[in-house]
Image (cartoon, grey):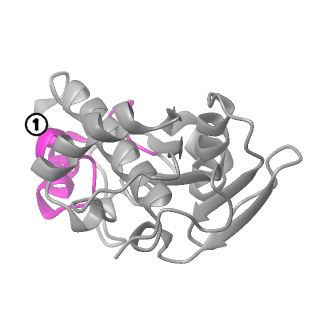
Amino acid sequence: MLTNIYKFHDEIGTDEAGRGCLAGPVTAAAIVLPMGFANSILNDSKQLSEKKRVKLRPVIESSCISCAVAHVFPEKIDEINILNASILAMHKSIDQLQTLSEFIIVDGNKFKQYKHFSHECIIKGDSKYMRIAAASVLAKTYRDDYMDKIHEEFPMYNWKKNKGYPTKEHREAIRQYGITKYHRKSFRQLPEQDTLKP
């Protein structure tokens, strides 16, 4: 069962989505929830169906004290690497919050100092704390919306379904059509023995 508070009643929770994708942005969300917030459905976004995530998003957004979402796009990912881009996305989402909190709980084990704020990294935090789980739902749903949008431009990759992850279908499309402006050029798009179409 998720816990609402880690240490402080106004702490910021943050998480990202899309780190392992071949295409599209890495997206992060940050959120501050009220002390009394509770939801029996909320969990790590990876453990929820798309239907449940979509249902939860307006509940989270209407209940929170403050929340924000930020994308970091492939060009920047290729420039600074995916770990740094994930952390940058989290920083950019925290930048947009309207809160006096100066304590951040982060999903995972890597983060960089944000201003003068204190932070703690929590492995599998999105399955332990509501603030991180809520951030994971926001990051995932907003990233999915973005991938659905760019799917219309390049339907042959079926991003509406695979969201840019390295599925067999996605890699077959890369093999056939090559890569787009939305693909991460620093990622291995195909297994080592394969070559991209010129």
Disc 1 is placed on an element classified as: helix
Q: Does the magenta-highlighted stretch encompass residue 48?
A: no
Q: Does the magenta-highlighted stretch encompass residue 167?
A: yes
Q: In the picture shown, does residue 66 fall above or below 30?
A: above
Horizontally, residue 153 falls left or right of residue 62, namely: left
Q: Which residues are magenta?
A: 157-184
Residue at 48% x, 58% y: name it: 132
- Quarter of the figure with residue 66: top right
Q: Quadrant of the N terminus?
A: bottom left
Residue 174: x %, y % from top left: 22, 48
- Residue that numbered label 1 is attached to: 156
Q: Which residue is at the far front?
A: 36
Residue 118: x %, y % from top left: 81, 58
Q: The residue under label 1 is which amino acid type?
A: Met
| Depth order, front residue of 72/30 | 30
| Depth order, front residue of 59/167 | 59
